[in-house]
């Protein structure tokens, strides 16, 4: 009997020890699980916000890169036209051909228009760089409104420059056509 009582006491103590330690473990596990679920939810919300930000920014960045490439192509055409005009004028000087006064007046007028277009183009030089200085901080801060505003301004400047470059190319083409 003494053995049975001793055995029963041991079993009872073991059960009490197990029960007293398992309740706090389960309670802390429930709290940890809840905290973990909250962290996962927060993480998913942040990822979703970033996905929306990336998609809106991506479209604008693609537009900006396309505009920049188009402007570079127009500028290359501009350089070709200027080089062609320079060669034509040098050939005229070397051959000793004298231009008609009416033609000189037309060329001077077109040259003045070119100077004003180049001056307008020079005024916009560096504007995009100034606008894009703080973009990384805005992306980190997830300030979509400010980013949209900056990207819209950059696109407007690029379109203005593209228009000016196209007008310059048209004037250069006119000059090239006038030179005999």
Image (cartoon, rainbow, N blue to C red):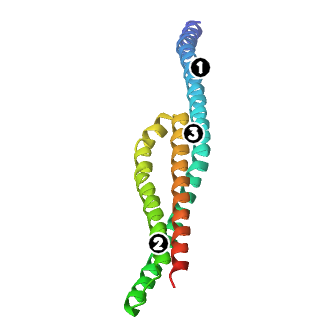
| Of marks 3 and 1, the one in the foreground | 3
- Circle 3 is placed at which residue position? 50
Q: Looking at the picture, how far across and down is residue 61, in whole percent?
A: 55, 51
- 71 and 123: which one is in front? 123
Q: Residue at x 43, y 84 (%)?
A: 87
Q: Looking at the picture, how far across and down is residue 112, in whole percent?
A: 44, 64
Q: Measured along the vertical axis of the image, is residue 43 above or below residue 38?
A: below
The reply to whether residue 5 is in sight is: yes
- Say which element carries label 3: helix
Q: Residue at x 62, y 45 (%)?
A: 55
Q: Looking at the picture, how far across and down is residue 9, in whole percent?
A: 55, 8
CB under 8 Å between callouts 2 and 1? no
Q: Residue at x 45, y 83 (%)?
A: 99
Rendered image quadrant of residue 38: top right
- Circle 1 is placed at which residue position? 30
Q: Measured along the vertical axis of the image, is residue 119 above or below residue 98?
A: above
Left or right, 146 with respect to 1, comes to left
- 31 and 89: which one is in front? 89
The reply to whether residue 80 is in sight is: no
Rendered image quadrant of residue 27: top right
CB under 8 Å between callouts 3 and 1? no
Rendered image quadrant of residue 5: top right
């Amino acid at each position: 009997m003494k053995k049975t009582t001793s055995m029963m006491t041991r079993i009872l103590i073991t059960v009490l020890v197990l029960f007293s330690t398992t309740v706090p473990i389960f309670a802390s596990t429930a709290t940890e699980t809840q905290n973990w679920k909250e962290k996962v939810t927060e993480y998913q919300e942040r990822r979703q916000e970033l996905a929306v930000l990336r998609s809106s920014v991506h479209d604008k960045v693609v537009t900006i890169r396309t505009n920049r490439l188009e402007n570079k192509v127009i500028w290359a055409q501009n350089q070709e036209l200027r080089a062609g005009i320079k060669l034509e004028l040098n050939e005229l000087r070397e051959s000793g051909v004298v231009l008609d006064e009416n033609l000189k007046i037309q060329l001077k007028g077109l040259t003045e228009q070119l100077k004003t277009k180049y001056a307008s183009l020079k005024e916009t030089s560096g504007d995009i760089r100034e606008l894009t200085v703080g973009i990384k901080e805005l992306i980190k801060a997830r300030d979509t409104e400010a980013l949209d505003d900056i990207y819209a301004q950059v696109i407007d400047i690029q379109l203005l420059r593209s228009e000016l470059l196209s007008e310059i190319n048209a004037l250069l083409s006119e000059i090239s056509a006038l030179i005999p």
